[in-house]
Image (cartoon, rainbow, N blue to C red):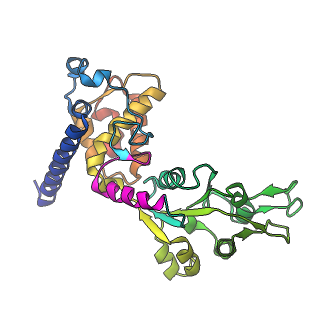
Amino acid sequence: MSAAAEQDRQRLLAEARELLARARALGLEAELAALWRPAGAAAAGAAGPAASRPAPQPGASAGESPWPGRFGMLGDSPPMQKVYALLERLTQADVPVLIQGETGTGKELVARALHEHGRRRGKRFVAVNCAAVPANLLESELFGHQKGAFTGAIADRPGQFVVADGGTLFLDEIGDMPHDMQAKLLRALQEGEVRPVGSNRTQKVDVRVVAASHKDLTALVREGRFRQDLYYRLNVVAIELPPLRQRGADLPLLIRAFLERLARQQGRPVPELSERALAALVAHRWPGNVRELENELSRALALGGERLDLEDLSPAVRA
């Protein structure tokens, strides 16, 4: 065994011991044991304490679910504890927040947590993916337009700033916003008002803006591709979401929670997971993060039977 492999082995063992200690403290030993149970042993343990425990809801808050986590998110690893501590403060501070993290780390989930646990929770939460809206329509999407402002504008339409008035506007993939649109967004944030396309009248709005990007915005600023003044306007407080490969202690919990939810959605019993399959899932680097993990388990559940083995996983995960 190479030195690097031995280091990985020792790290995983330490995380497993930490996870076991937390499971004992929360009364989750039966659920955790089910993850590591050898293939064929399911029947022997079916009548244990876990059989009578209600299935945990992956999307539920920590107060409603036996799974460790907070703010509707799963996981109790040190990196996630840092995120929870920051969220605890920011839910009561009505300031712009910039969420950064790799694709699939749950940036919109964090934005929703800021809204649903904050002062604006009774108002609208509106999400706009800046990378998904064509550049020539983004101004209309955000600020609205008047009838006849452009071809196809057959009626007045409010923009998402107005729709979110009093609530939270989540601007996802802000790093993909065209440079000329960045100046217009900056003005709206500074003045607290928007002007629909084709109109010479402005409208006051009161929104909390939460932005997110998987790109390094500081690098984009240095390259002249993102306005420095807009960056500072958005980045009052930053939240850096950890990639899944840095959340080793959370993986078994996430796997079990996703399997239970996906099984309910498909109307079938929760399958048992073999040791070989679990080992492969834990060892995978997950470049697509939590989203990739959920998709992988959905695929395995669709193709597998009552027990998921290594052969039920995709080649990339088995490698």
Toward the viewer: 196 or 312? 196
Toward the viewer: 91 or 9? 91
Toward the viewer: 277 or 89? 89
Q: Is residue 67 magenta?
A: no
Could you say which quadrant of the image residue 87 lies in? bottom left
Q: Residue at x 70, y 62 (%)?
A: 142
Q: Position of residue 250 (x, y in %)?
A: 30, 47
Q: Is residue 144 left or right of residue 106?
A: right
Figure check: 40 above or below 250: above
Asked whether residue 146 is in view, the answer is yes
Q: Is residue 76 magenta?
A: yes
Q: Residue at x 34, y 54 (%)?
A: 80
Segment tinted magenta in the rendering? 70-91
Q: Position of residue 126 (x, y in %)?
A: 63, 53
Total numbered badges shown on the rendered structure: 0
Q: Is residue 237 left or right of residue 244?
A: right
Asked whether residue 302 is in view, the answer is no
Q: Position of residue 53 (x, y in %)?
A: 32, 25
Q: Residue at x 45, y 64 (%)?
A: 100
Figure check: 185 above or below 78: below
Toward the viewer: 183 or 285? 183
Q: Is residue 313 left or right of residue 10?
A: right
Q: Position of residue 288 (x, y in %)?
A: 41, 52
